[in-house]
Image: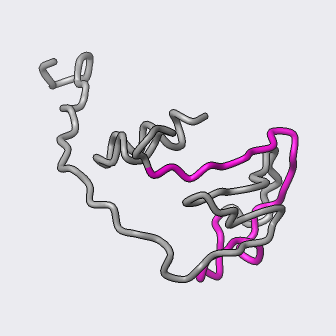
Amino acid sequence: MVALGSTNPARIFGLYPRKGTVAVGGDADLVLYDPSGESVRSAKTHHSKCDRNIFEGFKVKGKVTCVVVNGRVQFRDGALDVQRGAGRFIKREVTHAAAPHTAGVAGRAG
């Protein structure tokens, strides 16, 4: 789950190892996840300015219970407690994606 939701995206977007891993000098947001929890997706419960969700009403297994950012608990049991302006911009490195795999695709060499 960590690779899928954190490490791999950080690598793709040129932010690894500053993001995507828990390490000295890194900038990790720690998420506590309860795989047995349940919730319903809804724009009404998301902490966003968007007033809709394409997954509105979907019942899902698993639930985030706590998020720690910069050593401070910013989300716990559904309550958001953030400080405006506390985030910081992290410049990313330029990355080059590998060429897509084309072996076996009709009309393509590979």
**Side of 81 relative to 50 (left or right):** right
The span picked out in magenta is 27-54
Q: Is residue 74 magenta?
A: no
**Side of 16 relative to 109 (left or right):** right
Give me the residue at 48% from left, 81% from top. 85
Quarter the N terminus occupies: top right
**Side of 54 relative to 41 (left or right):** left
Number of numbered discs: 0
Give me the residue at 65% from left, 57% from top. 68
The x, y position of residue 14, in whole percent, is: 28, 46
Q: Is residue 44 magenta?
A: yes
The x, y position of residue 5, in whole percent, is: 54, 42
Quarter the C terminus occupies: top left
User: To which quarter of the image does residue 34 belong?
Assistant: top right
Q: In front: 75, or 26?
A: 26
User: To which quarter of the image does residue 65 belong?
Assistant: bottom right
User: To which quarter of the image does residue 51 belong?
Assistant: bottom right
Give me the residue at 87% from left, 40% from top. 36
How are the colours assigned in the image?
one colour
In this rendering, is residue 27 above or below 11?
below
The x, y position of residue 96, in whole percent, is: 17, 41
**Side of 86 relative to 41 (left or right):** left
Give me the residue at 25% from left, 23% from top. 105
The x, y position of residue 46, in whole percent, is: 70, 71
Residue found at the very far left of the displayed protein: 109
